[in-house]
Image (tube, rainbow, N blue to C red):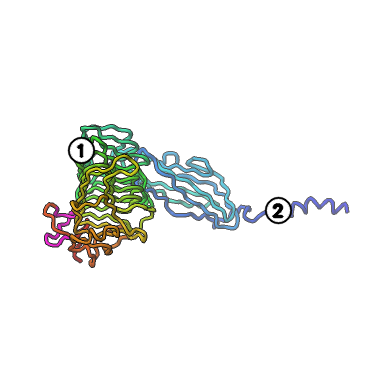
Amino acid sequence: MRYLLAILPLLFLLSMISCEPKDEIITTDPDAVLAFSGDTVLFDTVFVSRGSVTKRLKVYNTNKKAIKISEIALAGSGASPYQLTVNGVQSPLVNNLELRGGDSIYVLVKVNINPTDVNLPFLVADSILFKTNGQQQSVKLVAYGQNAYFHRKESIGTTTWRNDKPHVLLDTVLVKEGATLTIEKGTKVYGSNKSVLLVNGQLLAQGTPEERVVFSGYRREAEYLTAPGQWEGIRILTKSANNNLQYTDIKNTLYGLRIGNPGMGGTVVEGCAIQYAFLDGIVAFTSDVKVVNTLIHNCGQYAFGGLGGGKYEIVYSTIVSYNNPLLRETPLFVVTDFVPGTEIKNQPTSLKLVNSIVYSDGFNAADEMLVTPLSESMDISHNLLRISLYKDQLNKSGNKLNVEPKFKAPAKADFALDTLSPASSAAKFLPAILLDIKGKVRNINTPDAGAYERLID
């Protein structure tokens, strides 16, 4: 008995060792290496001095036993533009981290790029080094940096935004009354969260079919290219007059273009693409707006809205909603003599809707037009329209009702006309408009309805 009592502690110790979970036993086998969620952590364009979003690299121990990672380090050490955060600790070097068998951890990565004199995008690279059991593994870090003009809470006079570097809106930018903001062809403007361009003077966006002006969200990752609501948009204020946007893309906004300048010189939107707005593409209040050769698609409310009266001319335009993830509950095209929810009503209203397409793929959207009051003085002709309410009034003047336009690839936001599109040769010739949204010459005898003149295959 005394002998048994003497060996009980030893037996207990042996049992504890034998019961230690296998995934907690650290292996020193040099073949026991790590696995990663990717061999590269890639950052799209990062504007210098602003810093990047945080990317996550997942590190796996696929072995049954635990591994001691003797070192996680940036190859560029403290001089690297990249930052690592491991287990809540931000440091370019982490030592002796144990990872149980079958377990994983996240390594968080950010990058801050210092200003340079380079206007074009440039490459900034480094690596994360992992050392385990005498073996070294690495994951590449790649970022594309670019210098930019940054605009934060500015009130600007007459000026020109050049196209040599992108312009980043960080907050509210106001074009003062009497001032003109000219945006050169090929200029890229990126809006960050809650940023807005307010125009109380004049806006001249001078894009061309080959070098378009582009307004879009600040985030450059692929998943954000079609995401709405990333910045507020462009707002035309009461003192603004004679605005002209040519071959300009506006996307990823809360609303694309919001116009409220009653009695002032009109706004011309020509050859533009307004897309992925959380609310409205273009919405105007008792204002004068002319839209030519323009695509407006996939908005959360109106694609085009003219409210509280005004003078609206829409020609050769494609106003559509296809594969739209936003739960739209309003017609695409709305013109009224009142502003809902206000005392503004019975305002003089003029409408010219010619050579255009207003259509959608929504099963519950039998009416994509609301025009009230609909007047015989309005020119609504040679359009493809999805409507039921006004079938008797608009089933004339060259209009085609409830006939699928047959675009090339609407799922890919390609709204050029397919070979068999009923919009082909459906427009009437307008001598003042000879080009389409891409600068292609329109057929002078039988032009096509919509923003795109069909290419002959």
Residue 318 vs 287, above or below: the answer is below
Q: Would you say residue 292 sits in the magenta stretch?
A: no
Amino acid tagged 2: Ile
Nearer to the camera, 273 or 52: 273
| Circle 1 crowding by C-alpha within 10 Å: few under 14, some 14–19, many from 20 | some
Q: Residue at x 27, y 64 (%)?
A: 403
Q: Give the residue type that dot 1 points to.
A: Met
Foreground residue among 61 and 28: 61
Tell me the residue that label 2 is attached to.
17
Estimate the x, y position of residue 4 in percent, counting from the top left.
Answer: 85, 54
**1 or 2: tag closer to the N-terminus:** 2
Q: Residue at x 49, y 47 (%)?
A: 107
- Specify the quadrant of the image occupied by residue 323: bottom left
In the rendered structure, find residue 264 and report the number of the disc placed on it: 1
Q: Position of residue 334 (x, y in %)?
A: 28, 50
For the residue labelled by badge 1, is the local secondary structure a helix, a strand or a loop? Answer: loop
Q: What span is colored magenta in the figure?
A: 433-447
Asked if the residues shown at circle 1 and circle 2 are in contact, with their CB atoms under 8 angstroms apart, the answer is: no
User: In this view, which residue lies farthest toward the right?
Assistant: 1
Quarter of the figure with residue 417 = bottom left
